[in-house]
Image (spheres, rainbow, N blue to C red):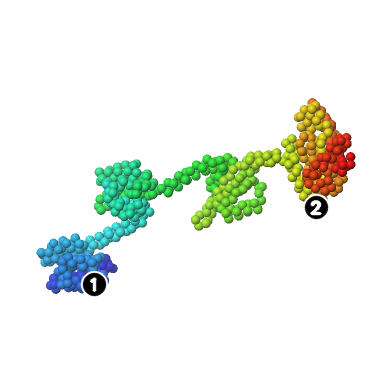
């Protein structure tokens, strides 16, 4: 024996005989000593106290006890022996008139009873062997049921065993799922009470079919609303099957609360719809930055179909306009903050370069490892071009393309700041056309516009690239000459302009050529003014003096003041 009631192989059956009558004890020993397939080893004690004292040793396979002992009698003996030997089968010896006590002993947990004087060797040996076997089987069943109950109670799903009208068993998760304070709150109730209307009908039909046919249920699944004992509800996924419970068929009902999964599914479905229908292009890469998903908008913007880019690095979209520092900065910010937002020039499949507004996000696993990168972008090429057109219209003359009054003011301020820092000189020429109005009156405004465009080109040909030619409006122009070495530079430019204007302008065929002149006023920094407004006003006054002097000439401010 390893433990009481668990017999070692190739060993005798060890019997503890508790009998205060030496003759009866001897008779039992003789019967057990007769021929047997398995030998019996008998230990005799005469009192309950002696029997209890041997209990801790656990050396016996079976206890055979009389109920009338010097220190105990009847039911008291039964209770004491069972308590002392809880894992060892007990067989009771009774007198002829004490069959009632033997029956009581069996009902309280003893394996069997024998009537003294009516047991031969074969009956005694067989009774003890059967007692051991039944005890071992019962113990194995109990242990199996305990293991089953433990496993079932550890299940993450609610488990009920039911018949057609009541719950027979509920595990621990079922209690929490249905919010039962005690297991007994679920036992005995109609299982259909836990289902919503559609699930209730299916469950009831299945359980009734099982009861009617006394046959196993076909495994099936039910999804729907489940009802808790407190009146609340949840989304349930139910599996129905048949098992044997206490020698009868019972329905095993396994319920999983899928409320969170349903919510996640709905969110996933919504995200999928957004992914597929949004106007913004979306691209998802794995942790190694290989493309694993793109949406239809990506295909429209880039020209690449999904199969073209799957498994590739997004660098296949690069335009080449950004240097290494740009990308290093982008990845540094993304790794540090998890996000990056900016504008990127990329290239479509057809080779066309375009600009996109891009947002990058980094997704990490629970352990911090990068799982995915998500890029969301939109083509803003048209938007950028429109912004550029607006910026251009705000700074340049729509007809001639020359800087307008606003841009002239900015450039003049910059030139003045530089001249002040370097103690340099600059000149401002104010030019007004002589005879432009008759051209408009005679040939029309379209011809006049053509003349102004041609004039602008000649003016730009007369100055350096660093100089500024601006149109203030109508036939008035201002020229800024920064970094002059001397006033003679301004005189040279003015003379060059008058010489260029002396050549007739060829307009449309029906107009022919026209001649036009200009009057020019010249102001110098710092001699004639220190601010942009002062210099332009001074040059304007000098221009009017040039007109009064006969037109087609230029005057410096100090010359105009003397005239």
Position above or below: 142 against 195: below
Q: Which residue is at the front of the view, 212 or 123?
A: 212
Q: Which residue is at the front of the view, 4 or 458?
A: 458
Q: Which residue is at the front of the view, 151 or 188?
A: 188
Check the picture and name the quadrant holding the N terminus. Answer: bottom left
Q: Which residue has dot 2 on it?
A: 422
Where is residue 539? Give x, y as percent. Answer: 82, 41
Where is residue 441? Give x, y as percent. Answer: 79, 27
| Residue 528: image tag | none
Determine the secondary structure under disc 2.
helix
How would you rate the neighbour count of disc 2 (Cα within 10 Å): few for under 14, some for 14-19, many for 20 or more? few
Q: Which residue is found at the position 83% from the left and 29% from the top?
A: 513
Residue 393 visible within the image: yes
Distance from disc 2 to disc 1, alpha carbons, whole Å, reads 117 Å
Position above or below: 394 against 120: above
Q: Which residue is found at the position 83% from the left and 40% from the top?
A: 541
Where is residue 402? Give x, y as percent. Answer: 75, 39
Residue 479 visible within the image: no
74 left or right, relative to 249: left
Q: Which residue is found at the position 78% from the left and 46% from the top?
A: 531
Q: Nearer the viewer, mark 2 or mark 1?
A: 2
Q: Which residue is found at the position 31% from the left and 53% from the top?
A: 170
| Residue 54: image tag | 1
Which numbered disc flags the more N-terminal residue, 2 or 1? 1
Q: Which residue is at the front of the view, 168 or 518?
A: 518
How would you rate the neighbour count of disc 1 (Cα within 10 Å): few for under 14, some for 14-19, many for 20 or more? some
120 left or right, relative to 368: left
Position above or below: 255 against 451: below
Determine the secondary structure under disc 1.
helix
């Amino acid at each position: 024996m390893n433990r009481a009631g668990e017999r070692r192989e190739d060993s005798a059956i060890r019997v503890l005989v508790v009998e205060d009558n030496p003759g009866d004890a001897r008779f039992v020993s003789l019967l057990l000593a007769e021929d047997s397939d398995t030998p019996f080893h008998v230990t005799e004690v005469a009192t309950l106290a002696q029997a209890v004292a041997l209990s801790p040793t656990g050396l016996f396979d079976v206890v055979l006890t009389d109920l009338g002992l010097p220190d105990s009698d009847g039911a008291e003996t039964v209770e004491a022996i069972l308590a002392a030997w809880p894992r060892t089968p007990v067989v009771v010896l009774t007198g002829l008139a004490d069959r009632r006590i033997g029956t009581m002993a069996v009902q309280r947990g003893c394996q069997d009873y024998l009537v003294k004087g009516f047991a031969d060797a074969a009956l005694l040996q067989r009774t003890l062997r059967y007692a051991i076997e039944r005890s071992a089987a019962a113990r194995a069943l109990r242990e199996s049921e305990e293991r089953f109950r433990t496993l079932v109670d550890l299940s993450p799903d609610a488990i009920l065993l039911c018949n057609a009208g009541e719950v027979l068993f509920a595990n621990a998760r079922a209690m929490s799922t249905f919010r039962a304070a005690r297991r007994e709150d679920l036992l005995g109730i109609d299982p259909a009470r836990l289902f919503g209307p559609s699930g209730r009908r299916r469950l009831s039909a299945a359980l009734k079919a099982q009861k009617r046919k006394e046959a196993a249920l076909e495994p099936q699944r039910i999804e729907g609303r489940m009802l808790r004992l407190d009146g609340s509800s949840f989304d349930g996924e139910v599996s129905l099957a048949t098992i044997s419970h206490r020698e009868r068929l019972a329905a095993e009902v396994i319920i999983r609360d899928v409320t969170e999964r349903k919510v996640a599914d709905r969110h996933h479905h919504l995200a999928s719809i957004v992914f597929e229908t949004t106007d913004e292009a979306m691209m998802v890469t794995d942790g190694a930055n290989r493309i694993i998903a793109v949406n239809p908008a990506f295909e429209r913007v880039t020209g690449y179909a999904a199969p073209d880019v799957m498994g590739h690095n997004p660098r296949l979209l690069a335009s080449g306009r950004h240097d290494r520092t740009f990308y290093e900065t982008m990845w540094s910010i993304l790794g540090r903050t998890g996000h990056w937002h900016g504008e990127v020039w990329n290239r479509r499949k057809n080779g066309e370069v375009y600009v996109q507004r891009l947002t990058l996000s980094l997704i990490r696993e629970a352990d911090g490892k990068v799982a995915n990168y998500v890029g969301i972008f939109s083509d803003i090429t048209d938007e950028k071009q429109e912004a550029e057109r607006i910026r251009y219209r705000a700074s340049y003359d729509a007809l001639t393309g020359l800087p307008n009054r606003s841009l002239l003011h900015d450039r003049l301020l910059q030139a003045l700041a530089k001249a002040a820092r370097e103690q340099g000189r600059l000149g401002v020429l104010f030019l007004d056309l002589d005879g432009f109005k008759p051209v408009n009156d005679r040939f029309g405004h379209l011809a006049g516009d053509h003349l102004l465009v041609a004039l602008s080109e000649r003016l730009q040909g007369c100055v350096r690239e660093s100089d500024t030619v601006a149109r203030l409006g109508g036939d008035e122009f201002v020229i800024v000459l920064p970094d002059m070495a001397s006033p003679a530079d301004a005189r040279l430019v003015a003379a060059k302009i008058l010489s260029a204007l002396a050549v007739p302008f060829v307009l449309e065929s029906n107009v022919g050529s026209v001649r036009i002149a200009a009057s020019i006023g010249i102001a110098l920094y710092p001699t004639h003014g220190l601010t942009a407004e002062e210099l332009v006003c001074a040059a304007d006054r000098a221009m009017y003096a040039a007109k009064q002097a006969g037109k087609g000439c230029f005057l410096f401010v100090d010359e105009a003041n003397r005239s």
